[in-house]
């Protein structure tokens, strides 16, 4: 059985201008969404409380809100989760004192009184504002470090330029330290560091690393954009999903790169554009198959895994689609774009 | 043939070890070993992050110093001296008169060498100085306080009886507590979070309580309340007491505290026992104050204030106060374990009820089953016999992940279950890489033997490169993540390594067996 016919030769590289425009537009929309709308942080990052309750019989949301008001929780959002018949609700509030002494029993009583049926408090999560800030920093750092480690690994492994990658590491460390001492926020720090990385890769001619990092930023930015536009919450598990996307997207990219490297040796007379296009085509079958199997398990997780894991699965689904696209249409053409620029000089 | 058998031995050893590690999780009675730990999000339990309010410790230390200073001043009969507290961490002293200044300076040199001097100003007749703790000393006090709080909380939880609690320091001033499987989270939180400073203070009967309630609290005394809740009517009454600030004896002198039942009313109370020094002090204090009332104060709440009938020797006392049996038991635990050196606040709490955990496990397993089956069917259809081999390897991967989790004592969390599902999707990727390569080589007209060798050799480097990057993100995740995320990082890492092993080593062996031993002429791929 074969989905992709052998000897297939689609012109991926030739359409790179179109691909760049599409990607550029998507990234722009994502960044705009981030600035205009702003990301919706879950309680992990924003601080606040979340209580999951299960009633013994159906209850109107308005009644739950009445119950909450009687324990002085005014602006809570109440949302039904899971199967309707389960009568399960998620209560979310900015207040970070839900965990305070005597509160849970009081809430229990208040909800029972308002709804008139027995209630079971199944989950309580409370994150204080300080912890929220800490977790946000940790998450940014995690994304940042995995990008950097991977960049250094790729430039070393693919182009045997361990010295250059060492230089990148040192320069980057210096830049980050300099920006840090100037007292900018961590988000700016991460963006600046990524920019420095890209510029360094371009100058030092680490084209594979450049392509891989661009593809990664592409994938993560668009996934974050989709989350922002759909007003989904960023939680710790979503960050874990983003990091997994980084790993997965790279996995895809590396497999194409490996083939490019192999074909460059084999076909030294063929123009580089054709070699790259051929490599993408040769690995196309594998790219589609793997994306397919991963997609299938993620769909299964999305629909059957329960609502705690819902957003995690969703982030991965978006990431897999975008990541597969980027390893075909972005990561490899960038290597070509760099080669063409280098030749012009 | 020799390489063939070495490979076989390695695989057999790995598989048998995996089975050995996996069995206790499902059949603990066969041989005892570590089971796969379930995270709090799967088995239910409570995760708490507490912050020790270390500033309060420094404040308390300064308060003690200012008390000591006042005592010393009185003892040395220094006159015209004012002691003030301009801030929580500072003492300011003003003195008039040459003789007094000289005496005070001597005192500073001899008795209060630990304190840092600041804002000194001096002329012929007056002298003023600020006193506080040197930074090094206050840092030391703070560190000690967190250590002591950690130890105290550990003691309390141990005595409360939670199986496999995890209590550790996080950062400078935070304490992370994980209590798996705990049911009554409210009670546990009360037990952990209470400061439990027990003090014995004399009731100030020389001054008028009503005047104090109007606002004129005499120096050296304070107003404290006794709070009672009527169990039947739930009505709360607050009785004020005017007590001396100076504590005669504190919980630090206790050696034991246990629950006992009042023989008359059958009400539970806590009987406490002092150490030798404490017992002597108690004997002296009760002897000197017969007829007066002694307030038993816990965390600035009066529990009882009995009148001292006679000198009490033997170092025993009781704390009464309409306790339920559970309350009395918890109070005894807290008193035995000692007081927290500073108040703690809950910064983060995550509590998952056992029923939700069970639901999560069920839905996680269902999605693994469905997703896994779809992938398995697809592989068998697409790659025929080779696909079935890949399917067998997916099952082997699951076994290896289970064994890895058990062997490293890692924790399986809900995101970890998601990691398992993801691994199934990605594990077949390694097989796909190899199989696609073999197909390509076959199309070039190579013999089955040649195509298989070339396929494996070329695909192996690619697999290594591709998986190492996933491992890098997993390691970073592990470094920065908290509980559930760490679980995800661990399962993902084990999964990646396991699938590399099965795709490269196990597949190769099976292919070699069919090509060399069974001498098949066509590869079913």
Image: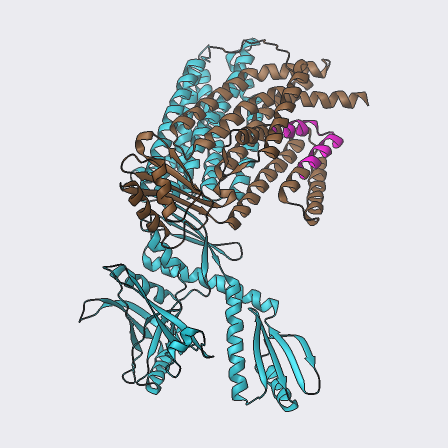
Q: Main structural element of the magenta stretch: helix, strand or loop?
A: helix
Instruction: Report which quarter residue B252 is drawn in.
Output: bottom left
Q: Nearer the viewer, residue A118 or B324?
A: A118
Q: Where residue A313 sits: x, y (%)?
A: 46, 29
Please indicate whether residue A73 sits to the left or right of residue A151 in the image: left
For the question of whether residue A247 can be seen, the reply is yes
For the question of whether residue B3 can be seen, the reply is no
Picture colour for chain B: cyan
- Residue at the outermost left position: B264
Range covered by the magenta-colored residues: A193-216
- Residue at the outermost right position: A345
Q: Nearer the viewer, residue B48 or B67?
A: B67
Q: Nearer the viewer, residue B247 or A72?
A: A72
Q: Where residue A231 sits: x, y (%)?
A: 51, 32
Please indicate whether residue A248 sits to the left or right of residue B396 in the image: right
Q: Where residue A91 sits: x, y (%)?
A: 40, 40
Residue A194 among magenta residues: yes
Instruction: Report which quarter residue B136 is drawn in.
Output: bottom right
Picture colour for chain A: brown
Relative vertical location of residue B58 with respect to residue B212 in this rendering, above or below: above
Residue A142 among magenta residues: no
């Amino acid at each position: 059985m074969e989905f992709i016919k052998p000897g297939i030769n689609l012109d991926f590289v030739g359409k790179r201008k179109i691909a760049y425009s599409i990607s550029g537009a998507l990234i722009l929309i994502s960044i705009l969404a981030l600035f205009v709308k702003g990301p919706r942080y879950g309680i992990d990052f924003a601080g606040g409380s979340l209580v999951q309750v299960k009633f013994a019989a159906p209850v109107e949301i308005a009644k739950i809100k009445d119950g909450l008001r009687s324990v002085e929780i005014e602006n809570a959002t109440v949302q039904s989760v899971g199967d309707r018949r389960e009568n399960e609700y998620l209560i979310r509030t900015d207040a970070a004192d839900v965990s305070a002494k005597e509160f849970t029993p009081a809430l229990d009583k208040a909800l029972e009184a308002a709804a008139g049926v027995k209630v079971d408090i199944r989950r309580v999560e409370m994150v204080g504002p300080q912890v929220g800030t800490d977790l946000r920093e940790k998450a940014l750092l995690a994304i940042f470090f995995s990008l950097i480690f991977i960049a250094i690994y790729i430039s070393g492994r693919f182009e045997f330029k361990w010295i250059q990658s060492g230089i990148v590491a040192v320069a980057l460390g210096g830049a980050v330290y300099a920006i840090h001492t100037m007292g900018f926020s961590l988000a700016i720090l991460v963006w600046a560091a990524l920019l420095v990385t890209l510029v360094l890769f371009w100058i030092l001619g680490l084209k594979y690393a450049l392509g891989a990092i661009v593809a990664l930023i592409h994938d993560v930015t668009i996934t974050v954009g989709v989350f922002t536009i759909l007003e989904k919450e960023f939680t710790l598990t979503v960050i874990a999903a983003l990091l997994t996307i980084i790993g997965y997207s790279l996995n895809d990219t590396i497999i194409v790169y490996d083939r490019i490297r192999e074909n460059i040796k084999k076909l030294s007379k063929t123009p580089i554009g054709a070699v790259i296009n051929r490599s993408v085509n040769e690995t196309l079958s594998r790219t589609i198959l793997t994306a397919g199997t991963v997609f299938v398990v993620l769909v299964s997780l999305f629909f059957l895994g329960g609502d705690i894991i819902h957003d995690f699965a969703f982030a991965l689904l978006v990431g897999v689609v975008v990541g597969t696209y980027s390893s075909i249409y972005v990561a490899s053409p960038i290597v070509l774009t760099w080669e063409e620029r280098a030749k012009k000089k | 043939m020799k390489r063939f058998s070495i490979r076989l031995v390695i695989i057999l050893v790995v598989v048998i070890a995996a089975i050995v590690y996996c069995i206790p999780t499902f059949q603990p009675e066969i041989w005892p070993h570590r089971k796969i730990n379930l995270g709090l999000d799967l088995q239910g339990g409570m995760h708490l992050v507490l912050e020790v309010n270390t500033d309060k410790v420094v404040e308390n230390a300064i308060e003690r110093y200012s008390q000591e200073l006042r005592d010393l001043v009185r003892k040395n009969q220094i006159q015209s001296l004012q002691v003030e507290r301009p801030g929580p961490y500072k003492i300011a002293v003003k003195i008039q008169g040459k003789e007094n200044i000289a005496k005070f300076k001597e005192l500073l040199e001899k008795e209060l060498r630990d304190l840092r001097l600041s804002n000194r100003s001096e002329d012929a007749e007056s002298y003023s100085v600020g006193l506080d703790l040197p930074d090094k000393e206050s840092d030391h006090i703070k560190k000690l306080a967190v250590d002591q709080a950690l130890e105290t909380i550990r003691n309390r939880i141990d005595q409360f009886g939670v199986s496999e609690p995890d209590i550790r320091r996080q950062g400078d001033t935070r304490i992370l507590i994980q209590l798996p499987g705990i049911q009554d989270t409210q009670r546990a939180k009360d037990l952990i979070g209470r400061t439990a400073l027990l003090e014995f203070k004399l009731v100030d009967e020389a001054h008028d309580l009503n005047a104090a309630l109007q606002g004129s609290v005499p120096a050296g005394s304070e107003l404290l309340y006794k709070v009672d809740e009527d169990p039947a009517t739930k009505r709360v009454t607050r009785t004020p007491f005017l007590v001396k600030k100076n504590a005669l004896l504190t919980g630090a002198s206790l050696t034991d505290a246990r629950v006992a039942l009042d023989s008359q009313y059958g009400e539970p109370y806590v009987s406490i026992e002092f150490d030798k020094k404490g017992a002597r002090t108690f004997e002296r204090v009760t002897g000197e104050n017969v007829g007066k009332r002694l307030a038993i104060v816990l965390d600035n709440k009066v529990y009882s204030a009995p009148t001292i009938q006679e000198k009490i020797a033997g170092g025993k006392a009781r704390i009464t106060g309409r306790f339920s049996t559970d309350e009395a038991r918890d109070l005894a635990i807290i008193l035995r374990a000692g007081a927290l050196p500073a108040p703690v606040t809950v910064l983060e709490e995550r509590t998952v009820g056992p029923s939700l955990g069970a639901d999560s496990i069920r839905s996680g397993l269902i999605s693994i089953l469905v997703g896994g089956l779809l992938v398995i069917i697809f592989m068998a259809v697409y790659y025929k016999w080779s696909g079935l081999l890949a399917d067998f390897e997916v099952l082997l991967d699951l076994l290896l992940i289970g064994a890895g989790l058990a062997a490293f004592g890692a924790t399986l969390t809900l995101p970890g279950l998601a990691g398992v599902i993801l691994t199934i999707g990605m594990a077949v990727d390694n097989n796909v890489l190899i199989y696609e390569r073999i197909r390509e080589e076959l199309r070039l007209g190579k013999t089955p033997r040649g195509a298989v060798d070339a396929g494996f050799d070329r695909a192996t480097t690619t697999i290594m490169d591709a998986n190492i990057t996933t491992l890098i993100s997993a390691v970073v995740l592990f470094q920065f993540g908290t509980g559930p995320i760490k679980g995800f990082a661990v399962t993902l890492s084990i999964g990646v390594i396991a699938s590399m092993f099965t795709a490269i080593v196990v597949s190769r062996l099976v292919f070699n067996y069919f090509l060399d031993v069974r001498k098949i002429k066509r590869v079913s791929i």
